[in-house]
């Protein structure tokens, strides 16, 4: 059969395959740890133990509270086994995070993280996007569809198109990371928060978070394709996040070396406030643009 009839398929390189395997293993370990934690909660509920008053049942304060509860000996032994398993899985997650973060540091050196919006959570900033070659997508809508953030469309012939929920096709870790970054962007000053508030007032929190995640995907496509930096990024905050990634990857500390580290600027309150004020000005400018746009009706923004 002539080769011209075969469609070309993209094959990831060795680094991409390794990173995907690391992310998949981390997700498996986290799911297993969640199941073990649910076993502990199930034991407590079976014996009508009241809800833990602390934020986390498995931190130091939560475990101290757990030891004071009245439980049968066999159930207490089962909880002890589960806690040991949780601690072991936590070590595995830390090791996998360290390996993934090393890839993050390589991305920082290449400029990918520097070009991304500063709202990306540093713990998972590159756990998924590096597994995607941005050159595969000729337009941002294709990248959005790859992440499964595009809405479903139902249309018969020339009838009116009906848009539904997002398709949720594609790679789940990428979509989850973008939604997590969207919630972070909703709390940080900037145009993305203004966009989140605009959608939230009409459709609610959940729809607004997914809309911001889609906008982040489009924004990342433009930044990486055009090799530009995010205009409203906060340099001191980005440097601090890059330093956090380097330390998590095992880089040596810089204390006592007689010079200021790369993330020192974020400790200067005046500089931090000036960057925050610039982001707030950008947020107000975006709100004004939406209100005065002739293609949209005025919208109310939360204060």
Image: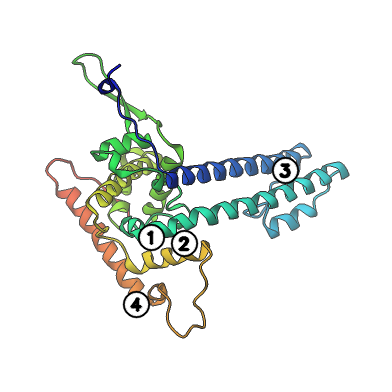
Q: Mark 2 points at which residue?
A: 245
Whether residue 131 is visible here, answered yes or no, is yes
Above-or-below relation of 26 to 241: above
Q: Which mark is residue 270?
A: 4
Q: Residues within 10 Å of mark 2 (few under 14, many from 20)?
A: many
Above-or-below relation of 227 to 6: below
Q: Name the residue under label 1.
A: 108
* Labels 2 and 4: the sequence-earlier one: 2
Q: How far apart are marks 2 and 4 (CA)?
A: 24 Å
Residue 49, located in which quarter of the rendered image?
top right
Residue 147, located in which quarter of the rendered image?
top left
Mark 2 vs mark 4: in front: 2
The quarter of the rendered structure image containing the N terminus is top left
Task: Give how far across and how far down residue 109 sits, in percent.
Answer: 37, 62
Q: Mark 3 points at which residue?
A: 40
* Labels 1 and 4: the sequence-earlier one: 1
């Amino acid at each position: 059969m002539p080769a011209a009839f075969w469609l070309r398929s993209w094959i990831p390189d060795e680094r991409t395959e390794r990173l995907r395997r690391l992310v998949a293993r981390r997700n498996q370990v986290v799911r297993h740890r969640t199941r073990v934690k649910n076993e502990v909660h199930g034991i407590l509920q079976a014996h009508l133990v009241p809800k833990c008053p602390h934020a986390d049942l498995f931190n130091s304060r939560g475990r101290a509270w757990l030891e004071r509860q009245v439980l049968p000996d066999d159930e207490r032994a089962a909880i002890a086994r589960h806690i040991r398993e949780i601690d072991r899985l936590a070590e595995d997650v830390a090791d996998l995070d360290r390996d993934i973060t090393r890839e993050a540091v390589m991305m920082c050196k290449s400029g990918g993280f520097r070009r991304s919006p500063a709202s990306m959570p540093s713990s998972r900033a590159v756990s998924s996007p590096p597994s995607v070659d941005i050159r595969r997508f000729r337009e941002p809508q294709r990248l959005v569809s790859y992440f499964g953030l595009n809405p479903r469309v139902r249309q018969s012939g020339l009838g009116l198109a009906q848009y539904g929920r997002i398709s949720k096709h594609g790679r789940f870790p990428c979509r989850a990371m973008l939604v997590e970054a969207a919630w972070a962007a909703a709390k940080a000053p900037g145009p993305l928060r203004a966009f989140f508030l605009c959608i939230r007032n009409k459709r609610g929190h959940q729809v607004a978070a997914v809309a911001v995640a889609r906008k982040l995907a489009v924004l990342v496509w433009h930044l990486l394709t055009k090799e530009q930096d995010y205009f409203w990024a906060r340099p001191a905050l980005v440097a601090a996040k890059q330093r956090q990634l380097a330390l998590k990857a095992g880089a040596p500390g810089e204390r006592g070396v007689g010079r200021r580290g790369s993330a020192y600027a974020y400790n200067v309150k005046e500089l931090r406030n000036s960057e925050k004020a610039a982001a707030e000005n950008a947020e107000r400018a975006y709100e004004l643009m939406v209100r005065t746009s002739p293609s949209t009706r005025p919208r109310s923004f939360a204060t």
